[in-house]
Image (cartoon, rainbow, N blue to C red):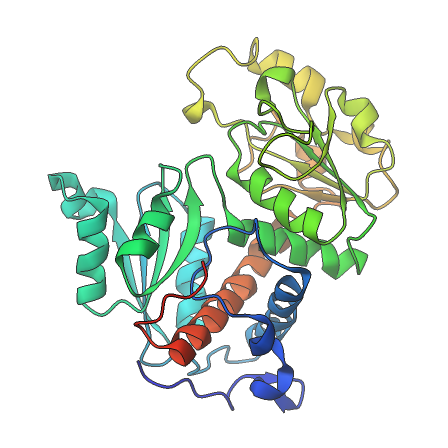
């Protein structure tokens, strides 16, 4: 792989090189989930994202940092925000970006995931950004290809870059999230975004409150006996909103539901919609967030979705910088360890 030219990316007046210290904190060739990430690793990624935001603010937001690197996006599910931001992130850093959709590839002819991944590596993929409807698919890909793999969302399991951009957005306004109350309301059961946010926010010391109908709360969560970090469970949104620093509404994922989880959308909206009246129970200037796409009038009202406290568009903007940081860091690690090395996932 072509060596990365560091002088083009700068942190203020200092180049982003070994002097920043971030490469000592980051030793990952893949980004699959955030369940075992340390505070130091998350902080390193946040600092690198600051640098990438500076690059994006330039009159000509382009640097050759990843020139000679090939990034392939392989999406088995539809996506607008995640796919477009990864594509732009790669191009801003000078990488060659190839987009592959399952519907337009040999997958539609019966090709297996492993064969697809090996084919993409054989044509020169250095980084594989992958979204799949099956939980664990990126882990399988990482075992069968010696390129770096980034999980862009797998089944009901994880969406790490969304959680990272959420964390970055919160920190941009709150400074630190330690001790802050973050309320995540909605379809938690089917939300990979909620799961990844639980890991990152827990690691950074936030107080996490999950609010949903009992049928949309994963079994065992909050009891301390499950595989997810400790959180507080609340089924009454009015109580959950009291004193919140951040309110994150989740999309009702009707496409993943195969049973009567709620009586109907009207009843759900009456009890769990984030609206102006409920937002008034949170702290003044509490942040309103949503991973998108939004079902306005269902999980969030129009007035709140586009109100002064909404950070939804900012989340999308920050997503490009966060994904630039991810591509930069994992590529540096892969370069340092060599393609034959089997780094930590």
- On the image, the x and y values in percent for residue 325 come to 53, 68
How many marks on residues? 0
- 275 relative position to 109: left or right: right
Image height of 177 relative to 241, above or below = below
Query: Which residue is painted at 81% across and 31% down in the image?
Result: 241
- On the image, the x and y values in percent for residue 189 come to 55, 27
Quadrant housing the N terminus: bottom left
Residue 119, located in which quarter of the rendered image?
Answer: bottom left
Relative depth, front residue between 344 and 246: 344
- On the image, the x and y values in percent for residue 32 come to 45, 53
Say whether residue 115 is visible: yes
Relative depth, front residue between 198 and 290: 198
Quadrant housing the C terminus: bottom left
Q: Furthest-left residue in view? A: 109
- On the image, the x and y values in percent for residue 78 come to 36, 41
Query: Which residue is painted at 61% across and 65% down in the image?
Result: 41
Query: Which residue is painted at 19% across and 46% down in the image?
Result: 104
Say whether residue 292 is visible: no
Image height of 91 relative to 153, above or below = below
- 200 relative position to 160: left or right: right
Image height of 30 relative to 329, above or below = above
Residue 333, located in which quarter of the rendered image?
Answer: bottom left
Residue 263, located in which quarter of the rendered image?
Answer: top right
């Amino acid at each position: 792989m072509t060596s990365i030219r560091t002088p083009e990316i700068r942190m203020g007046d200092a180049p982003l090189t070994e002097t920043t210290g971030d490469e000592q904190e980051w030793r990952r060739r893949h980004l699959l989930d955030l369940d075992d990430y340390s505070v130091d690793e998350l902080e390193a990624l946040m600092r690198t994202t600051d640098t990438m935001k500076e690059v994006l603010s330039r009159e000509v937001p382009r640097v050759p940092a990843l020139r000679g690197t090939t990034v392939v996006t392989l999406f088995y599910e539809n996506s607008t925000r995640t796919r477009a931001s990864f594509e732009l992130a790669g191009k801003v850093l000078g990488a060659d970006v190839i987009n592959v959709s399952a519907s337009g590839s040999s997958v539609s002819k019966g090709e297996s995931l492993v064969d697809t991944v090996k084919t993409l590596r054989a044509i020169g993929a250095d980084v594989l950004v992958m979204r799949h409807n099956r939980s664990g698919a990126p882990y399988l890909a990482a075992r069968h290809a010696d390129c770096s793999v980034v999980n862009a969302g797998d089944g009901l399991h994880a969406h790490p870059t969304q959680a990272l951009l959420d964390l970055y957005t919160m920190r941009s306004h709150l400074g630190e999230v330690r001790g802050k109350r973050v309320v995540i309301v909605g379809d938690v059961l089917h939300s990979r975004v909620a799961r990844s946010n639980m890991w990152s926010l827990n690691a950074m010391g936030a107080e996490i409150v999950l609010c949903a109908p009992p049928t949309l709360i994963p079994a065992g969560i909050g009891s301390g006996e499950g595989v997810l970090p400790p959180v507080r469970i609340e089924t009454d949104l009015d109580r959950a909103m009291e004193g919140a620093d951040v309110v994150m509404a989740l999309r009702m994922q009707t496409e993943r539901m195969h049973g009567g989880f709620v009586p109907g959308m009207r009843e759900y909206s009456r009890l769990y919609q984030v609206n102006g009246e409920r937002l008034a129970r949170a702290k003044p200037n509490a942040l309103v967030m949503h991973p998108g796409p939004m079902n306005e009038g269902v999980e969030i009202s129009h007035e709140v979705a586009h109100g002064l406290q909404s950070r939804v568009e900012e989340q999308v903007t920050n997503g490009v910088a966060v994904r630039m940081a991810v591509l930069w860091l994992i590529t540096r690690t892969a370069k340092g360890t060599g393609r034959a090395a089997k780094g930590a996932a």
